[in-house]
Image (tube, helix red, strand yellow):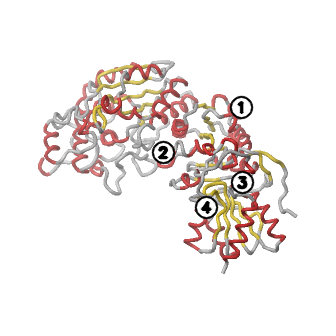
Amino acid sequence: MNVDQLSIQELPEIARQLRRDVIKMLMISNSGHSGGPLGAADIFSALYFNILKIDAKNPTWKERDFFFLSAGHYCPIWYASLARKGYIPLTELSTLRKINSRLQGHPAPGHTHGIPGVELASGSLGQGLSVAVGCALGLRLDKSERRVYVFLGDGELNEGQVWESAMTAGHHKVDNLIAIVDRNNCQIDGKTDDVKGLNPLADKWKAFNWNVVECDGNDIEKFRATLKQVQSFKGKPSVVIANTKMGKGVSFMEDDYKWHGVPPNDEQGKKALSELPKTKFNDFIEFDWEK
Amino acid sequence: MNKYKITDNKATRLGFGEALVELGNENPNVVALGADVTGSVKTDLFKKAFPDRFFNIGISEQDMIGVAAGLAIAGKIPFVSAYGEFASGRPFDQIRQSLAYSELPVKICASHCGITVGPDGATHQSLEDMAIMRALPHMVVASPCDYNQTKKMIKASLNLKQPLYMRYFRDNSPVFTNSEDAFQFGKADTLIDGKDITIIACGLQVWEAILAEEILSNEGISVRVINMHTIKPIDVEAIVKSAKETGAIVTAEDHQKHGGLGGAVAEILAQYYPVPQEFVAINDTFGESGVGTELMKKYGIDKDAIVKAVRKVISRKK
């Protein structure tokens, strides 16, 4: 089922469906990232089903908001959101990472060999914020009311380019830009504190002249309310540090960095799905063992 | 008697700066980005004319490429400018992912290219940029031969659908092309016709090739001179035709021997019509400080080096 905007009450259910989609996509592809996408399902449900001004039937709509996924490896949750929204057929989700598919392992734009709704390639980390800043500056030149959203992983903040662009956005007071940092404290080698500590993270952004707000990124209503609040902030770019749990919704994956870059096997997938009850939106595929 | 006359002595970078202002007047979507060296790379002219449409990103070329990509997505036509090394080598991965793979029509205007940037020394002499930019799918790579052609190239770039890497130079250099001559990306200019050998050059080596032809024609050698201003997509037809008609090729460029214009020409010859080729280029070494003309001589990319290479390649003809 394709869906457009949803009420606040319905968002938890679409978030659960997106998690089911991610698990099934990864089981089929037998490749891809589990932890980040599951942890970010609540963020994507709020963005794609309540916040973003977009039109799946007209992906290049002149009045659309922009969304950039800087951390390209989160794409399973993005593809699921775009499919649920109607950008691509739901059945196409079963082609993730397969040859001849538009669902590349890391996203490619719709005008190349990727899918509509994706406007920039990502995968090599740290590049999305710069692009979002440029896009926001372009909209500002046009005196447009449209907004630019960009999603970053916290491990990605190791990249120097992120701070180059943070400085640019602060300097140019790009207040039509909202960055979302998925603060799950994990990266592929371990806890962010152990690999290369990011704290004090909010202070870093503040020092770069950003409006900084922290919230629980797995509480959809709180996250949505936070976005609504920063939308009207003037004079500075805003960053929402969304505290999430990697692997959220699947007990044996939660807060375990080992699930950063691997898919569940059949047995793990079945267990994960059993923890995420079916929803009214229906799965994009029904496995034989489910019939 | 030389077949081309020097009408002026002006820097290619100035041609870029002036043409950009003209484009800015013609098209309100043209925007420019700089990385702090705006005075040297001549984007200061655009900044002065259109302060709202100029963005100084500071000394962060990787960020500058990304910001330009975002401006392109928002419907603008971005021109970024920096010294060649910092416009290509420093932000290579950003160019690869955010421009080439994303197929965004950003123009990278690389000033101060080649060894002739001179006194700043090897760190500032981009000698590998054509090789790395040429390796990227979707990129157009071009290098004008003088001030007039730089202006025409900038004007023509407006409608390119692919990202462009355009390399030009700091120093004043002879202006010898006509401002009325036609220009088309991918279509080489045959400047002098000849039948014994073809010199294919780009950038400042085009003038050196013209000087070399004068010396060689006095020795009775009939030399064709081609200005290969577009290195990618390269003019296959012009190369193959010259190989067939003259039987020997010399390439000349202010760039490493590996992967630049010479490499691009050799790829075509090997596939379509192999003939002897000699390479006038930097021979797998870094440069050093000095005056541009001194360095061209020391590192073997001036007219004398071209003359020597022509004699050698003719001796290799069967």
Subunit under mark 3: B
For the N terminus of chain A, the quadrant is top left
| Residue B296: numbered disc | 3
Residue in the image at 63% along x and 36% along y: B32
| Residue B234: numbered disc | 4
Q: Which residue is under mark 2?
A: B93
Q: Nearer the viewer, mark 4 or mark 2?
A: 2
Determine whether, in the image, residue A73 is placed left or right of residue B263.
left
Determine whether, in the image, residue B134 is placed left or right of residue B247.
left
When asked about the image quadrant of residue B205, the answer is bottom right
Q: CA distance from mark 3 to mark 4?
A: 25 Å
Identify residue type, mark 3. Met
Q: Nearer the viewer, mark 4 or mark 1?
A: 4
| Residue B49: numbered disc | 1
* Label 1 crowd (10 A; few <14 / some 14-19 / many >=20): some
Residue in the image at 76% along x and 58% along y: B208
Q: Nearer the viewer, mark 1 or mark 2?
A: 2
Identify residue type, mark 4. Ile
When asked about the image quadrant of residue B44, the answer is top right
Subunit under mark 4: B
- Position of residue B190 relative to residue A63, above or below, is below
Q: Earlier in the sequence, mark 3 or mark 4?
A: 4
Q: On the same chain: label 3 and label 1?
A: yes
- Secondary structure of the residue carrying numbered label 3: helix
> Which residue occupies the foreground of this view, A149 or A90?
A149
Q: CA distance from mark 1 to mark 2?
A: 32 Å
Q: Earlier in the sequence, mark 4 or mark 2?
A: 2
Q: CA distance from mark 4 to mark 2?
A: 23 Å
Identify residue type, mark 2. Asp
